[in-house]
Amino acid sequence: MKPRKIKDNIYWMGFVDWDSRLFDSLIPLPDGTSYNAYLIEGSEKTVLLDAVEEELFYELEGQLENVAKLDYVVALHAEQDHSGCIPQILARYPEAKLITSPKAKGILIDLLQISEESFITVKDGETLSLGDKTLEFIHTPWVHWPETMVAYLKEDKMLFSCDFFGSHIATSDLFVVDEGRVYEAAKRYYAEIMMPFRNVIKKNLEKVAAYDIDLIAPGHGQIYPRPSFIIDAHKDWIDGSLKNKVVIPYVSMHHSTKKMVDFLVAALLEKGVNVEQFNLVVTDIGKLAIALVDAGTIVVGTPTVLAGPHPSAVYAAFLANALRPKTKFLSIIGSYGWGGKTVETLAGLIPNLKVEVLDPVLVKGSPKAADFKALENLAETIAKKHKEQGFA
Ligand code: FEO
């Protein structure tokens, strides 16, 4: 793809990845993604903001064909999807300096063996004149690595945010045209990589929201012509109240746990509590992550197998613990054949979750009348707790 003009002397470069379905060998990409780099031609200096993976250098190299001189490369974030081909870029433009935060310098030397002499490190708030344009570097740690920063182009009121405000979508649109579609993709992105750091990100959000921004140009996904859309969405995901919603990740081997889930779901709905259930054998784990962003309660459903929870339930619990959602309540339901330590094992996997654990419902064999009554009570307790908390 050729460079795409955003404004006079400002171009999108990079790679639209329509084909990939997994990121970092971990994160589902149902809609592909894009790796965005940006070229800014000032009256005196030319700068490339971010880059692409090492193996995609050929694409960026083609886009840089008519760029005879590059004064600076800026690495806002050291992860290789944005930095991987920087060594090749520096080899092509040996006079170019690499601008990073001080922390990113060490990480990039470790990851890519870039020579120390190539670097210029910038402090929080430091500016760089390109002649008629000025870049200001704003340190925004933990979006989502410790070294991350964003760059504000003062004269054009553009914020280059790298992973911050990103979304994984491959499209031919340069700018966001369908905010509903982007909202879901950006929420998924936030849930999967940003949510654990939301307390720091909240401060970064306040920091960047103070700038007069006309366009946000992220490292993944499309450019936001209405920055308040994505800034307000992040405010809500970080600080907004929880929803009157129970998320139920579950797995069932011989239908007993499934019967319990079905009963609990029906009881919750009767009591006015919304539900999102995810069969862990088939679910898109990113959808589960999205649901966790504002879930009032999580109920894990699992059979006992090999004396503990099903491995799929273990994975879901591990993931929830790593993502640290705001969720307030948690319970466990499921069936067992003769014994085991399902509840103890699962409870031990979620030390990061600041939740009140509601009485679990574990049944021997298939659920019977007394077990359904216990599930009814669990639904009642959840409905009461949600009401007390004001979850809407
Ligand atoms: Fe898009 Fe953290 O890299």
Image: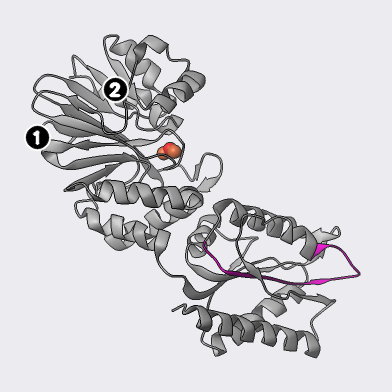
**Which numbered tag is attached to residue 282?**
none
> If you read the primary sequence from the N terminus, does the residue marked by circle 1 or circle 2 appear first?
1
Q: Is residue 385 left or right of residue 74?
A: right
Q: Where is residue 124 in the image (x, y as percent from the top left)?
A: 31, 33
Q: Which residue is drawn at 37% across and 9% down?
A: 117
Q: Nearer the viewer, residue 37 or 320?
A: 320
The residue furthest right is: 338
Is residue 340 magenta-colored? yes
Q: Name the residue under label 2.
A: 73
- Helix, strand or loop at label 1? It is loop
Q: Which residue is drawn at 16% across and 33% down?
A: 10
Q: Position of residue 358 (x, y in %)?
A: 68, 74
The span picked out in magenta is: 326-342
Mark 2 and mark 1 in contact (Cβ < 8 Å)? no
Q: Name the residue under label 1.
A: 8
Quadrant of the image where one finds ligand 1? top left
Q: Neighbour class for label 1 at 10 Å: few (<14), some, many (≥20)?
A: few
- Residue 177 seen in this snapshot: no
